[in-house]
Amino acid sequence: MKLREISELLNAKVRCGEDRLDEEHETAFASDLMSDVLTLGDYNPVILTGLSNMQTIRTCEMGNLDIIVLVRKKKATEEMIEEAEDEGMVVMESDYSMFKACGLLFQNGMQPIF
């Protein structure tokens, strides 16, 4: 699924990484526990989380993950956006709950990691 499609399905605002919206990604993972996210680098999934602080960006940097969708009306801070831009990440913001966002992505072909 293209990142552009993800943005449209989740009615998400793209905060950075607009130049990457035509990239395809097949898998997603949802968690607010960044320790769980650290284990996913080999898969490079789209990360859905409600954790909106620098820990999210730093964890994704360490785990070589670069697509973040903030859910539950969470907003990225300017500091988060600046760091994400420096790292070439994509950050989106969706008002949907994590459950709804995951359901919509799964219903439209996005696959879980496990």
Image: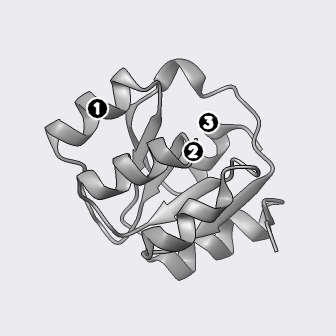
Task: Determine which residue is flagged by label 2.
Answer: 65
Residue positioned 53% across, 57% down in the render:
10
Q: Residue 45, position in %: x, y?
A: 68, 52
Nearer to me, 69 or 41? 41
At mark 3, the secondary structure is helix
**Which comes sooner in the sequence, label 1 or label 3?**
3
Give me the disc on residue 12.
none
**Which comes sooner in the sequence, label 2 or label 1?**
2
Residue positioned 46% across, 27% down in the render:
17
Task: Determine which residue is flagged by label 3.
Answer: 4
At mark 1, the secondary structure is helix
At mark 2, the secondary structure is loop
Q: CA distance from mark 1 to mark 3?
A: 22 Å
Q: Residue 109, position in %: x, y?
A: 84, 60
Q: What's the amino acid at mark 3?
A: Arg
Q: Residue furthest bottom?
A: 99
Task: Determine which residue is flagged by label 1.
Answer: 83
